[in-house]
Image (cartoon, grey):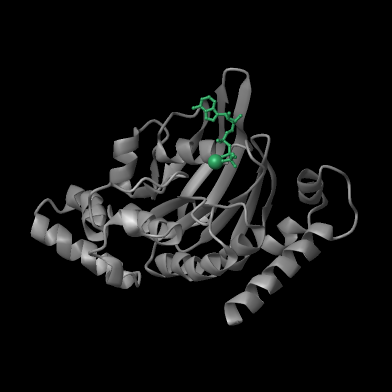
Amino acid sequence: MANDTLLKVSNVSKRFGGVQAVNDVSLELGGDEIIGIIGPNGAGKTSFFNLISGLFPADSGTIEFDGKDITKTDLPTRARSGIGRTFQVVRPFSGMTVVENVMVPVLINHPRPSVARAKAMELLDELGIADIAERPTESLTLAMRKRVEVAKALGTEPKLLLLDEVLAGLNSREVTDVLPFVTRVRDRGVAILMIEHIVAAVMEVSDQMMVLNNGQVLAAGDPQDVITDPKVIEAYLGTKHTDDTIASNIISEAEQRGSESNA
Ligand SMILES: Nc1ncnc2c1ncn2[C@@H]1O[C@H](COP(=O)(O)OP(=O)(O)OP(=O)(O)O)[C@@H](O)[C@H]1O
Ligand SMILES: [Mg+2]
């Protein structure tokens, strides 16, 4: 394992009954990297995250994190060792303000409430959302709740953050607002694996991309190479195309988002 590799997943697989949800998937992530993961519904993306976070064990394969083999460790141990995640369905603790929501994970490492509150405020401030600290989470837009979800995931001070569709359900203006938030988290020294359906948005922030399809890695590497890979185009369009239809769609999607954000 190279010195700067934070996460090394080797040939992990997971079967649920008759469904091979994850099939021989490998990935290597540096400590300051963002890898974007795309793929159709049911491709195994969330299941892959569940194997990394330790929600369930892999049937086979190994996972090394921060220089240690964590393949056999449970979810709380992995969380303590520095793996944080958001969930595809955002569920803030109701009846609580934003800062109180963020305090919950912070309390794990900082049990004194006054300290936890100060740490949570510091985090909100660094992420640029200190202004909503005292708002009840029920009053927030989905885009704001997604940001609070990221702040909560950072509350346990992870080295790796797994983001499962934090942009889903947002309009293109909100996506443009939330994307820099993801790079800001990375700039705080947190490596990121990011599952998204909005390909142009993933491309904008990812150092590498991986495409999953039927539980398998269809393509991985440089984002531009990945989205122009004929296998990826075929999986997305369902038929063989030799032109760059997907690439040009993605580029026009990106251009449109760019012009909206400048408007
Ligand atoms: N806990 C589970 N028990 C049984 N089957 C599961 C479980 N989790 C996932 N699966 C199955 O594994 C396959 C992959 O699902 P997964 O949720 O990982 O896909 P996904 O790529 O995250 O899809 P989406 O884009 O819709 O979120 C699906 O067929 C799903 O039904
Ligand atoms: Mg999913």
Q: Residue furthest front?
A: 139
Coordinates of residue 231 in the picture (x, y in percent): 80, 47
Among the 4 quarters of the image, the one containing residue 190: bottom left
Give the quarter of the figure containing the C terminus: bottom right
- The answer to whether residue 154 of the structure is visible from this angle is no
Q: How many marks?
A: 0
Q: Residue at x 25, y 65 (%)?
A: 133
Q: Residue furthest top?
A: 17
Q: Is residue 101 left or right of residue 20?
A: left
201 vs 211: above or below: below
169 vs 20: above or below: below
Q: Residue at x 38, y 65 (%)?
A: 189
Q: Residue at x 58, y 42 (%)?
A: 26
Q: Nearer the viewer, residue 34 or 240?
A: 240
74 vs 254: above or below: above
- The answer to whether residue 72 of the structure is visible from this angle is yes
194 vs 57: above or below: below
Q: Residue at x 42, y 70 (%)?
A: 184
Q: Nearer the viewer, residue 249 or 218?
A: 249
Coordinates of residue 5 in the picture (x, y in percent): 47, 55
Q: Is residue 96 left or right of residue 174?
A: left
Coordinates of residue 237 in the picture (x, y in percent): 81, 47
Ligand 1 appears in which quadrant?
top right
Q: Nearer the viewer, residue 232 or 61?
A: 232
Coordinates of residue 185 in the picture (x, y in percent): 40, 65
